């Protein structure tokens, strides 16, 4: 069922079933630190800068806030173990698309690709664009009524950088990852130095929060962790996946959990009882309370840089899924031709950006989240469940085997089920709209997959026009 094929950097373990020849459009250039930077740059984004204010207000206790971060971090680490194993078994562009194809067939994979194209990728792009615009306006002191216009402008600017090539995107990812960690480090240290230890946030001896508050905190925390799985889409560009993916994925989740917990505690200690604690651009408010208004705007500017990194990572990873679809003959190859020098696919990026701009004009930040997260979470869990379907290969130096199998899969699926239920109850209209759009891909898959089998051909490596 499996075979070994030599490559310049790696002995690849994959399946013989329906594989198209792998072309040289993508080059392996992401080592451990670059992969870790991508996870930090994408995950520590607008979620952490919008979530702690609401969590501290609704939960009212440091212990409950830390408990939520720890729980979601632990469950995310279980999912990271699953993706690390699948990524080393199938080190190809596309990530979840490839895992679903190998476990459940081409039609299931196509529906995931359909969801990525029409729901997840534009939804996440739009949400990050709106969050980024919130902080741009905070820096400029401009009216919040300009959020949509500024969000579209930010998306177009970063999409342009993405199409310039992977080197440009990689530089943005490294710089923004450092900016995030530096900004958060400054805030945490400043709070510890300036706040009164006797004020230590909120009493830990508080009753259990009401279910709506706890559910909202879990949804916010999950969104704040979103994106670590996107590293799987870059599987064909990872140097030595066996050595790179496990520490990057699991280590990235651990770093993110520690950062989130520290920033949340800092926020609660510095902002307790202040009326503007629920301000969406709360880092600006926190910075102003610690250093004055001018410094508050400076910190908000640092957040702009940080969130821009998250959006850059999303724009970088999304076309890899469409490339995997094109290789299976179910997506127009002309729309996803990668420039062999720049390692970018401008036409695919343009589709993603156009759909994201439509969502920005139609919905609020919360509505956009409700539209794409439930569908994305469903397929995230389904792709992790591929480990229960595909026979595990014997021990091999090229393959990482997740410890305690199948416990990580079961634990992660528990998180997935809980998240879908919470969003379905909390945001039923947006969840239903997203589900309808995804379900439309099922009848389409019967036509497209059948047609694709009859004309399978590898994507050509041609420079874009």
Image (cartoon, rainbow, N blue to C red):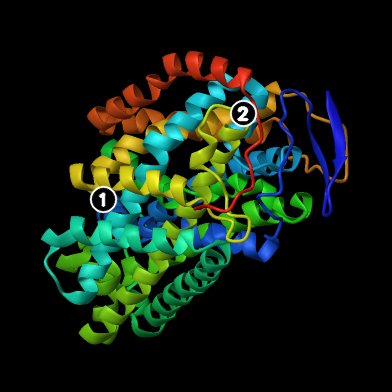
Residue 328 bears which disc, if any? 2
Indicate left or right for 247 with 167 as reference: right
Along the line of sight, the residue nearer the viewer: 118 or 131: 118
Extreme residue toward the front, this view: 465
Along the line of sight, the residue nearer the viewer: 22 or 65: 22
Which residue is at a point 51% across and 50% down the rendered structure image? 345
Which residue is at a point 70% across and 51% down the rendered structure image? 246
Residue 96, position as x, y percentages in the image:
58, 35
State the CA–CA distance, disc 1 to disc 2: 47 Å
Q: Is residue 218 above or below residue 202?
A: above
Which residue is at a point 43% across and 72% down the rendered structure image? 184
Figure quadrant of the N terminus: top right
Q: Is residue 82 above or below residue 340?
A: above
Residue 371, position as x, y percentages in the image:
31, 35
Q: Quadrant of residue 115?
A: top left
Indicate left or right for 165 with 419 as reference: right
Indicate left or right for 336 with 368 as reference: right
Q: Is residue 84 above or below residue 425?
A: below
Contact between labelled residues 2 and 1, with CB atoms less than 8 Å apart: no
Q: Quadrant of residue 153?
A: bottom left
Which residue is at a point 37% across and 35% down the rendered structure image? 119
- Residue placed under numbered mark 1 in the picture: 58
Q: How many marks?
A: 2
Q: Dot 1, how many residues are within 10 Å of its Cα: few (below 14), some (14-19), or many (20+)? A: some
Is residue 152 at least partly visible in the picture? yes
Whichever of callouts 1 and 2 sits on the residue coming sooner in the sequence is: 1
Is residue 56 at least partly visible in the picture? no
């Amino acid at each position: 069922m499996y075979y070994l094929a030599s490559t310049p950097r790696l002995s690849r373990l994959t399946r013989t079933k329906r594989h198209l020849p792998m072309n040289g459009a993508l080059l392996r250039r992401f080592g451990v630190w670059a992969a870790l930077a991508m996870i930090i740059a994408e995950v520590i984004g607008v979620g952490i800068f919008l979530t702690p204010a609401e969590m501290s207000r609704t939960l009212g206790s440091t212990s409950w806030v830390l408990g939520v971060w720890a729980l979601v971090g632990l469950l995310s680490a279980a999912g990271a173990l699953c993706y690390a194993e699948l990524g080393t078994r199938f080190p190809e562009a596309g990530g979840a698309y490839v895992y679903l194809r190998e476990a459940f067939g081409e039609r299931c994979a196509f529906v995931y690709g359909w969801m990525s194209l029409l729901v997840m990728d534009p939804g996440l792009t739009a949400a990050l664009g709106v969050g980024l615009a919130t902080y741009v306006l905070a820096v400029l002191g401009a009216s919040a009524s300009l959020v949509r216009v500024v969000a579209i402008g930010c998306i177009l600017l970063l999409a342009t950088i993405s199409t310039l090539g992977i080197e440009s995107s990689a530089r943005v990812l490294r710089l923004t990852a450092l900016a995030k960690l530096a900004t958060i480090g400054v805030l945490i240290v400043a709070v510890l130095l300036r706040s009164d230890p006797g004020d230590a946030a909120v009493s830990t001896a508080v009753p259990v929060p009401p279910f709506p508050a706890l559910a909202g905190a879990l949804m916010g925390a999950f969104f704040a962790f979103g994106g670590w799985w996107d590293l799987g889409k870059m599987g064909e560009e990872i140097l030595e996946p066996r050595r790179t993916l496990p520490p990057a994925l699991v280590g990235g989740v651990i770093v993110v959990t520690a950062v989130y917990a520290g920033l949340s505690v800092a926020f609660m200690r510095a902002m307790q009882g202040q009326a503007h604690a629920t301000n969406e651009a709360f880092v600006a408010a926190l910075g102003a309370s610690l250093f004055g208004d001018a410094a508050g705007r400076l910190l908000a500017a640092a957040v702009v840089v940080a969130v821009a990194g998250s959006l850059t990572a999303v724009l970088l990873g999304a076309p890899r899924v469409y490339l995997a679809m094109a290789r299976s003959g179910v997506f127009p190859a002309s729309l996803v031709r990668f420039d062999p020098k720049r390692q970018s696919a401008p036409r695919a990026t343009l589709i993603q950006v156009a759909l994201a701009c439509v969502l920005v004009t139609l919905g609020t930040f919360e509505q956009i989240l409700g539209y794409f997260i439930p569908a994305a979470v469903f397929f995230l869990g389904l792709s992790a469940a591929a480990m229960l379907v595909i026979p595990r290969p014997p021990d091999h130096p090229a393959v990482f085997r997740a410890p305690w199998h199948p416990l990580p899969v079961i634990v992660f699926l528990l998180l997935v089920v809980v998240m879908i239920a919470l969003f379905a109850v909390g945001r039923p209209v947006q969840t239903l709209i997203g589900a309808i759009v995804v379900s439309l891909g099922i009848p389409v898959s019967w036509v497209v997959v059948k047609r694709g089998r009859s004309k399978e051909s590898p994507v050509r490596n041609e420079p874009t026009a």
